[in-house]
Amino acid sequence: MIDLKNVTFSYGNKLIISNLSLHINKRDKIGIMGESGCGKSTLIRILAGLYRVDNGSIIVNGETEPLEISRKVSVVMQSPMLLPLSIYDNITMGHKYSDSHVEKAVKMARLSGWIEMLPEGLNTYLGDRADELSGGQAQRIAIARAMCKDSEVLLLDEPASALDSENSKSVLEAIMGYAADKTVVHVTHQSQHLEGYTRIYNLKDGILT
Ligand SMILES: Nc1ncnc2c1ncn2[C@@H]1O[C@H](COP(=O)(O)OP(=O)(O)O)[C@@H](O)[C@H]1O
Ligand SMILES: [Mg+2]
């Protein structure tokens, strides 16, 4: 469950989110559309507990403090950050998961084909290869990371923007299959990425309609 009441957020004196209230039930799939620069990524970061808001209240999965919220959500950021670690460590982020849990996430994120071609597979060190990675591969690593964390709330910031249309369709279908019993908020400027969503909002001038 996610509940925002009268939330306002600005960068300095630039108002991005204005008095926004939004209630999202458990297992809802919410799409949020809007033009570039309207504040979609900012809203995802607020929902992910990465920013403290200027005004209003936020409850995400029962938590109200940003740090606690961040522990309880899985998020795929628009420009995912990869660390100079192995692919495995970039997916698990230091958490202990069973091999089958990691393999399932790798498969769902459609990473298996590429990883099988690498001599060292999941243990491939990304430090030397970060530049060689395509945006799509980085995005799929971020998706596998979110699936491994497996939180009840999944936040997606243009998770398929770097994938071609065929790959994005297949990855988005996998995400929807995976997230059937999760609460999902997906921001994008591409309406075709929101097929099957419970509700779709538009964000403009800090306001959701
Ligand atoms: N860290 C930041 N500091 C100041 N301004 C920012 C910051 N991040 C984003 N902005 C500005 O806030 C507005 C909304 O950005 P963003 O949330 O990234 O929009 P979207 O994801 O919809 O493209 C833009 O005008 C952007 O330039
Ligand atoms: Mg954005």
Image (cartoon, grey):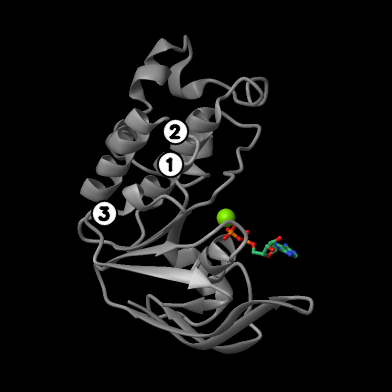
In the picture, residue 42 is in which quadrant? bottom right
The three-letter amino acid code for the residue at tag 3 is Ala
Please state, as top left, top right, bottom left or bottom right, where the C terminus lies in the image.
bottom left
Please state, as top left, top right, bottom left or bottom right, where the N terminus lies in the image.
bottom left
Circle 3: is it few (<14), some (14-19), or many (20+) Cα within 10 Å?
A: many
Q: Could you tell me how far apart the alpha carbons at marks 3 and 1 are, in whole angstroms?
A: 15 Å
Disc 1 element:
loop
Q: Are marks 1 and 2 in contact (CB under 8 Å)?
A: yes
Q: Residue at x 60, y 25 (%)?
A: 126
User: What label does residue 38 carry, if any?
Assistant: none
Disc 2 element:
loop
Residue 137 visible? The answer is yes
**What residue is shown with label 3?**
179
Q: Residue at x 31, y 43 (%)?
A: 172
Q: Is mark 2 within 8 Å of ligand 2?
A: no
The three-letter amino acid code for the residue at tag 2 is Leu
Q: Residue at x 59, y 45 (%)?
A: 79
Q: Are marks 3 and 2 in contact (CB under 8 Å)?
A: no
**What residue is shown with label 2?**
163
Residue nearer the viewer, 37 or 184: 37
The three-letter amino acid code for the residue at tag 1 is Ala
**What residue is shown with label 1?**
160
Circle 2: is it few (<14), some (14-19), or many (20+) Cα within 10 Å?
A: some
Circle 1: is it few (<14), some (14-19), or many (20+) Cα within 10 Å?
A: many
Q: Is mark 3 within 8 Å of ligand 2?
A: no
